[in-house]
């Protein structure tokens, strides 16, 4: 059974760095062509893709947020970590992790439940 | 960067009727397009990939069509559980991997 679960702080202050963890089960992050993305959704708004990491450690980022994002993985712990620096109230959103399982040309077939992060002083 | 545009923003349809949702890409994405359904308080769920292939467990009343830049999601006979927000996303040429802005399907 494939599952993904996001964890991290519920509340962060402006200018702080956010660190989110996606813990996966039912598959291995080292499997060829496997990858995990982070996606966010401000309240009442659309989905926004943030970053992706493949099993070979290849990474990609949103153009507009690239300077603030870092994605990494720990295969032994089955975890993918996203850090976002210099948080602002506009970054308040539900953050999701999602899996692709057959390489570059694949949709997100499994999603985590999401974690709501509020940015406020 | 490829921009995905969905229309309409809101669609009001009666249960049992047919719903047609559109998605346009700013440049060709071949057939590498997915549709996701999102209900309030839930994560998105994959409905359609490859523009027209239903994901596992998706009912046959959901169908996708199109290629290149124009795509359509059709729900043949709306059930109460189908009222939700629907997003399209291209995965032909990325990063980035943008979603459309969504179509809210509401009960008429």
Image (spheres, rainbow, N blue to C red):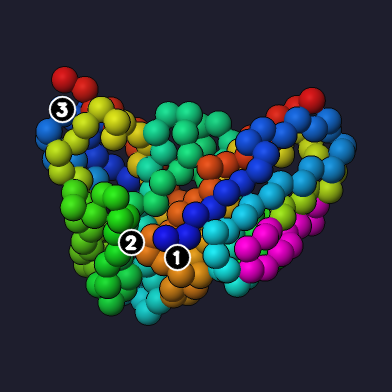
Q: Which of marks 1 and 3 is nearer the N terminus?
A: 3
Identify the residue shown where x is 12% and y is 35%. Answer: A16
Judge by depth and name the residue closer to the eye, A64 or A4: A64
Q: Which of marks 2 and 3 is nearer the N terminus?
A: 3
Residue indicated by mark 1: A100
Farthest residue to the top: give it. Answer: A121
Please give the range of residues in magenta: B59-71
Q: Can residue A49 be seen in this view?
A: yes
**Dot 1: within a 10 Å radius of its alpha carbon, few (fewer than 14), some, or many (20 or more) residues?**
many
Q: Which of marks 2 and 1 is nearer the N terminus?
A: 2
Farthest residue to the bottom: give it. Answer: A32
Task: Using the numbered discs, state the Cα–Cα distance from disc 2 to disc 1 in whole angstroms.
Answer: 10 Å
Residue indicated by mark 3: A13
Q: Is residue B97 left or right of residue A115?
A: right
Q: Mark 1 lies on which chain?
A: A
Farthest residue to the right: give it. Answer: B16
Identify the residue shown where x is 23% and y is 58%. Answer: A71
Task: Using the numbered discs, state the Cα–Cα distance from disc 2 to disc 3 in whole angstroms.
Answer: 25 Å
Residue indicated by mark 2: A52
Q: In this view, does B68 lie to the left or right of A107?
A: right
Identify the residue shown where x is 46% and y is 44%. Answer: A47
Quadrant where the N terminus of chain B lies?
A: bottom left
**Dot 3: within a 10 Å radius of its alpha carbon, few (fewer than 14), some, or many (20 or more) residues?**
some
Q: Nearer the viewer, mark 1 or mark 3?
A: 3
Q: Are marks 2 and 1 in contact (CB under 8 Å)?
A: yes
Quadrant where the C terminus of chain B lies?
A: top right
Percent of width and height locating residue A65: 26, 49
Percent of width and height locating residue B3: 49, 54
Judge by depth and name the residue closer to the eye, A63 or A22: A63
Secondary element under disc 1, as helix, strand or loop, is strand
Q: Nearer the viewer, mark 2 or mark 1?
A: 2
Q: Mark 3 lies on which chain?
A: A
């Amino acid at each position: 059974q494939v599952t993904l679960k996001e964890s991290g702080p519920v509340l962060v202050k402006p200018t702080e760095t956010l660190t989110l963890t996606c813990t996966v089960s039912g598959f291995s992050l080292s499997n060829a062509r496997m990858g995990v993305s982070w996606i966010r959704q401000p309240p009442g708004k659309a989905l926004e893709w943030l970053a992706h990491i493949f099993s070979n450690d290849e990474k990609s980022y949103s153009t507009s947020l690239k300077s603030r994002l870092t994605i990494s993985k720990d295969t032994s712990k089955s975890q993918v970590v996203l850090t976002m620096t210099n948080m602002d109230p506009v970054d308040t959103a539900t953050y999701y992790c999602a899996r692709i399982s057959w390489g570059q040309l694949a949709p997100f077939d499994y999603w985590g439940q999401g974690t709501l992060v509020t940015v406020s002083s | 960067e490829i921009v995905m545009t969905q229309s309409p923003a809101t669609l009001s349809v009666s249960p049992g009727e047919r719903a047609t949702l559109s998605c346009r890409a700013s440049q060709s994405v071949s057939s590498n397009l997915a549709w996701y359904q999102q209900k309030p308080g839930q994560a998105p769920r994959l409905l359609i990939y490859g523009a027209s292939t239903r994901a596992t467990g998706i009912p046959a009343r959901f169908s996708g069509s199109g290629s290149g830049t124009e795509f359509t999601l059709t729900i043949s006979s709306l059930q109460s559980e189908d009222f939700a927000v629907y997003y399209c996303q291209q995965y032909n040429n990325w990063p980035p991997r943008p979603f459309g802005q969504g179509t809210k399907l509401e009960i008429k």
